[in-house]
Image (cartoon, rainbow, N blue to C red):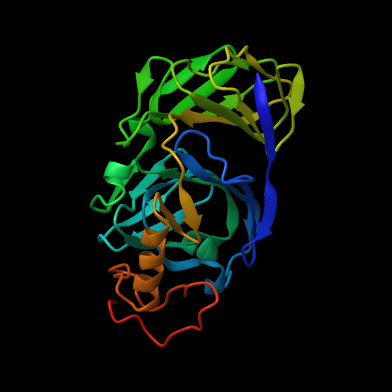
Amino acid sequence: MIELVVPQRRRDLGGFEVGRVLPYSGGRMVGPFIFFDHMGPADFPRGIPRTMDVRPHPHIGLSTVTYLFEGEIMHRDSVGSEQPIRPGEVNWMVAGRGITHSERFERARREGGRLHGIQAWVALPENDEECEPAFFHHGIEDLPSFDGKGARGRLIAGEAHGKRASVKTHSPIFYVHWDLDQGAQIDLPDGYSERAVYVVSGLLKVDGRELKPGKMAVFRPGEKISAVTAKEPGIAMTLGGEPLGKRHIEWNFVSSRKERIEQAKADWRTGRMKLPDLDHDEFIPLPGDPVPPANPMS
């Protein structure tokens, strides 16, 4: 059933680590999921420097999906949003033709604490790549849940197991957070061409193989997937959807066309992308570029 197992690659982002899972070798996606980062877990002392924040930066051609197990992140963007995200909630940002945003660890700076979560990017269909940018926040009460036999699930986006999340998506997708007791079993929904399971913590067994934390098992299209079993208590994410065709990814930009990414790079380099309304005093320059004095669109 398993086509490949993708390990996370740890990266230091200047004070805390993330495990990069997608994209994998050759630009491998899972349905429309083109990027998947496991953030932390990281313990922040009170008074962490602002240099650890993710300063304003741009995106095109995708939706970002932020989901936390622990901690809090303050989101601000160029469509006027200012929204903290807390465990069990969803921040869904549609970049479309272009958006900028920042992610600040303001609560950790005041109080200290742990940060642990997943940030994924979902590529947009070609007809929606240039849609209007938008931001949506969904609290726990908006997210359907599943509960039974030691497996407690929360549907983050899309449709699965007879339920549909209220998050607006642009293509067929499912994305579920599972809290698992030892011995619990979960299934992946039928009806999607591409599906995967990621181990956040604990130990899973599927198709006769054990999956440790930081591993994503990608299943062969069309295969009937037998139950995924928790050998230890833990957390798992199931995800998938329909493939969208080849996508190019460079830095924070995703597009079906290379020339569109080049245009986005030029727009960012020359200050033609508006910075967040409530966070426009600094920004991340294009990799390799010197830090300019200011962005004229601030």
**Residue at 46% from the left image edge and 27% from the top image edge:** 154
In the foreground, 268 or 235:
268
In the foreground, 41 or 213:
213
**Residue at 23% from the left image edge and 52% from the top image edge:** 132
Question: In the rendered image, is residue 234 in sight?
Answer: yes
Q: Position of residue 73 (x, y in %)?
A: 46, 55
Check the picture and name the quadrant holding the C terminus: bottom left
Taking 61 as reference, is 190 above or below it? above
Question: In the rendered image, is residue 176 in sight?
Answer: no
Check the picture and name the quadrant holding the N terminus: top right
**Quarter-of-image position of residue 179:** top right
- Total marks drawn? 0
Q: Position of residue 239 (x, y in %)?
A: 51, 30
**Residue at 71% from the left image edge and 37% from the top image edge:** 213
Taking 294 as reference, is 180 above or below it? above
Left or right? Give the position of 150 relative to 232: left
Left or right? Give the position of 287 relative to 132: right
Q: Position of residue 54 (x, y in %)?
A: 49, 65
Q: Position of residue 162 (x, y in %)?
A: 38, 14
**Residue at 64% from the left image edge and 45% from the top image edge:** 25
Taking 112 as reference, is 286 above or below it? below
- Residue that protrudes farthest toward the bottom in the picture: 293
In the foreground, 48 or 290:
290
